[in-house]
């Protein structure tokens, strides 16, 4: 895709490896919504440009076909870049419209691991933002049956969902702790100072105590 002068100018500002998310948000606030510009920036294949593109996409134009194309491109990134773009797309676009929320709710059994990650990460997000949809029993059964066989990026989001269910829903707390003990996921993983361990028994104990639940 031949880039417009506007896109070229923006790219010249965000190619530095020291670009901060706050800087991208500042640029996005100035641009507001510009779907065509977003697609231009996306076509550059650059990580920072794609983060900015996500912020200025028009959510009304995000059909499942468009989302599939975005996720296909995201899959070409490596490691943390791939996960950050996936989670950024979920948080900044897919949660903002009933249509895309409906799409996310249908991705439980998607063939795409990234779409399954989005499904589970969204379930976790609902709970840490104070919502507790009445389907935790069903979700926990699915997690218990699948988590040990899932792809690592999906496994993490499933574990995260189980963690927040355990924090906010006391009736499921022991079950979630037992799940963590059974799988042993993230038991020995080091975390940065001030961060909560991802091992479910520790995560649930710490986050529950913070909230006096």
Image: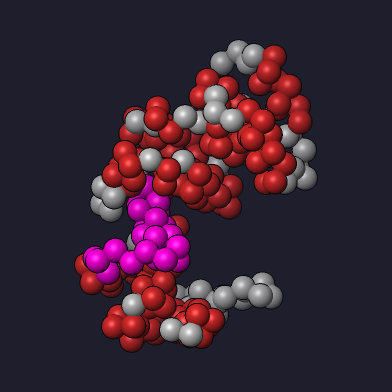
Q: Residue 99 colored magenta?
A: no
Horizontal and vertical percent position of residue 170: 34, 83
Horizontal and vertical percent position of residue 46: 63, 34
- Residue displayed at 63% across by 28% down: 31
Q: Quadrant of the N terminus?
A: top right
- Residue displayed at 69% across by 75% down: 193
Horizontal and vertical percent position of residue 63: 34, 31
The magenta segment is: 115-136
- Residue displayed at 55% across by 24% down: 34
Q: Residue 120 colored magenta?
A: yes
Observer able to see residue 96: yes
Q: Quadrant of the C terminus?
A: bottom left
The image shows residue 168, relative to residue 86, as above or below, that is: below
Left or right: where 54 falls relative to 16: left
Q: Nearer the viewer, residue 77 or 19?
A: 19
- Residue displayed at 74% across by 34% down: 15
């Amino acid at each position: 895709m031949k880039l417009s002068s506007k896109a070229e100018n923006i790219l010249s500002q965000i190619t530095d490896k020291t670009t901060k998310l706050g800087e991208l948000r500042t640029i996005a606030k100035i641009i507001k919504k510009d779907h065509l510009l977003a697609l231009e920036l996306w076509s550059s294949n650059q990580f920072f440009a794609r983060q900015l593109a996500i912020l200025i996409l028009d959510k009304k134009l995000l059909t499942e076909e468009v989302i599939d194309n975005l996720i296909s491109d995201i899959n070409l990134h490596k490691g943390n870049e791939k996960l950050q773009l996936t989670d950024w797309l979920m948080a900044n676009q897919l949660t903002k419209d009933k249509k895309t929320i409906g799409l996310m709710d249908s991705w439980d059994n998607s063939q795409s691991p990234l779409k399954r990650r989005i499904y589970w990460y969204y379930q976790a997000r609902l709970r840490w933002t104070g919502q507790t949809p009445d389907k935790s029993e069903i979700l926990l059964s699915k997690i218990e049956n699948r988590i040990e066989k899932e792809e690592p990026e999906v496994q993490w989001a499933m574990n995260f969902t189980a963690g927040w269910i355990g924090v906010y829903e006391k009736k499921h707390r022991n079950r979630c702790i037992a799940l963590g003990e059974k799988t042993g996921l993230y038991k020995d993983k080091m975390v940065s100072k001030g961060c909560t361990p991802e091992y479910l028994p520790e995560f649930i104990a710490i986050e529950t105590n913070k909230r006096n639940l």
